[in-house]
Amino acid sequence: MGRRLDHGESRRLTRLSGPTGEIARQWLWRGLALPGVLWLLAFFLVPFYAIFAVAMGGLDPIFLSATPEWNPLEWDFGTFTSVVGDFFAGPLGTTALRTLIYVLVACAACLLVGYPVAYFVSRRAGRRKGLFLVALVAPFWINYLMRMLAWVNLLGRDGQVNSALGSLNLPTPDWLAGRPVTVILGLVYGYIPFFILPLYAALDRIDSNVIQAARDLGAGPRQAFTRVTLPLSRQGILAGLVLIMLPMFGDYYTPNLLSGSPRTRMIGNDIDQFVNGTVTAGAKGASTTIVLMAFVALLMGYYLVSVTRSTREAS
Amino acid sequence: MAYHPRENWNPASRRRLWSRRDVLKRASALGLLLPGMNSLLAACGEGISTPTGSTAAPGTTGAPGSTAVASTAPPTTLIPIPTPQNRITQPLFDDNPMIASGLSPEAGPLKIYNWDAYLNPDVLLRFEEEFKVKTELTTFFNEEEAIQKLASGELAFDIWFPTVEITSKVVAGKLIQPLNHDYLPNLVNVWPWLADPYYDVGSQYTVPYTVYQTGIGWRTDLVDSADVENLANPWDVFWNSKYKGLVGLYDDFEETLQVAMFRAGIQDPTKAGQADLDAAAAALAELVDLVDIRYTIDGAYDGIPQGKFGLHHAWSGDMVNAQYYFPDGADTNGVLRYLWPANAPGSQSKALIGNDMLAVLRTAEHPVLGHAFMNWFLDPEISLLNFSWVGYQHPQVTVNPDSLVADGYVPDYMASAVVREEDFSNSQAYISTQLDPQTELMWVDAWTTAKAGV
């Protein structure tokens, strides 16, 4: 039996349930969102604007380093347009195209390898689900750079991988001599946990009764998967892909550590070179970052549209 | 907004350096007393190079009194660019005085700002024991980062380790303070060539730290020494397809573009034009398929002993240290070799040589202690202690280069990596020189092309 509302509670509810209450509720939620909005303004928009200010800025006359121009009316678009031109008909375009291919191949590999793992853990692991989850999270305990350095030793000319291949009388390639496959596998290895976890969460949320209903209506296991499980896990796949694609596009240490060859250079290497390898090319680095961000924003846009559409369909 | 090319608007890079207004505003604000306002105003029209007098360094080929920058050079910088032919006496500023003589060192701690792994920790311990003070070592990743932080004025380090290339900038920007030589009696221990260096005549702001050459390192079990040493131009070895998969160059745009230019016979890379840079970029791009080139920073001292490379672009100090990077239990058996191409018999190719420096920062809270540290570092015994760990030599008069081998600091098979004072006067030596900003941007573009892996 429910508790009877006292007078005060009753008054408060009355106040919040009327039109005035609706307005109060809206302001309450806006107030709660305010810290987050301020956080975003401070730590996203301001640095974002700073990148523009550096890209369109000048050079310090003494130290010759890039100096931001905060007044947009004084912006100089010379470097930026030059960099955009380089993307279409210059060395940056070659590197950007290579980066795109590496990222797409690595994402496809993550999907092929990661989906079955996430599916197994969420739906088939039973009582050992916790154990598998710990195993999935375990790589996060070790720094990304450390894991890559471990691979440098494993993949060396006389490393353990080649020792194992040699013992099976298989060819022993020089994995670290500028091979695209090594860099792509490095990307897959480095980022796949970030793909699996959101996908696992999405698969775990699927009501098993829905799948059961599909089976009851005559769908075979394959049909139930392709027509029920896969569509319902689409948001998890997209979230995982977005999570891994964004850092992959800016990655420069994986190709640096596992290759060092121009043949496997990615766009992040160019940005690193402009910003860290020279004094005067900071604006080129910032401009390249803006172009990269614009491309990545397209991906984010697709993701947001997709999520909005799914939410609308679900409601 | 449009800029006239003479206002340092470069159509090639379409990059604005500064406007006439900026030049006047910023220069006057900073009290830049480069030789006369006439030069400064001239800069607004044509860009300036404003050396304060020039006398050729000993052993160099420059004509006394000559200025470094040809009239055809791209618009340059407010800051004079020192070269051995264009010796620079750095300006003194009223608002950046040197410390008075006769002061006692402060109680510390001595705050040091240095590159990573560029100072023997035992040296610091010795200094702490001897001067009864604490030391605090902070490292920076690259010089750009260091300058940005120091220019903010928020950091109060006492001692800094800048490179020669930025001397004029950090003096004009008043990041470092003039030195009082009363505290530096050990300066007499430094090679004369560097005790009165072209970049800071009279050592008014800096004292030399270590010296280095840039050459070629290799393993005799992977590379035939004759393929390096017998070449008329030893830099050619990097283009030898016989060593495919074994070749590495430094991931450093200046050093590596220089290799391609030295190979092409260019004597002074700072004067290289766009066609020279394009040719250098093309030659480096050719290496991708020819030898599976890889670019690294640790390939000489670590990659060669580990067997990742048989042949690598190498700083002399890296090769001295490489002996310690063989895998545990490996039989090194003297397989390492080093050649500075300028020293190769009959070689006509140029090769880089240079040095780094010590300076006391203007914001130093312990400047007297900083001078004491600097002077203490110029002591031969301390220099050797530091050399034994960092692998890079100090230019000490009292340290006979031959004794470095005899005393076991350098293995005999690596004797060629010992730098001598006369190397700076070698006719094939190319002294490390700052690029002007427009030229640097041209080099960056060439480097980006070379590394695109097309």
Image: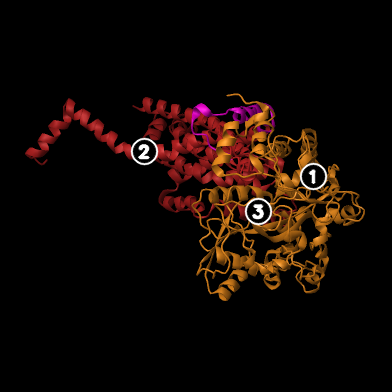
Chain colours: A red, B orange
Residue A87 shown in magenta: yes
Kind of element beneath mark 3:
helix
Residue B450 shown in magenta: no
- Using the rendered image, report if marks 1 and 3 lie on a common chain: no
Residue B339 visible: no
Q: Earlier in the sequence, mark 3 or mark 2?
A: 2
Task: State the image coordinates of residue A238 (x, y, percent, origin top left).
Answer: 48, 34
How far separated are the C-alphas under marks 1 and 2? 59 Å
What kind of residue is marked 2? Leu
- Please state which of residues B371 and B422 is positioned toward the viewer in this rendering: B371
Q: Which mark is residue B66?
A: 1
Q: Nearer the viewer, mark 1 or mark 2?
A: 1
The subunit carrying tag 1 is: B
Look at the image and give the residue range highlighted in magenta.
A66-93
What kind of residue is marked 3? Val
Circle 3 residue:
A152
Q: Quadrant of residue B162?
A: bottom right
Main secondary structure of the magenta stretch:
helix
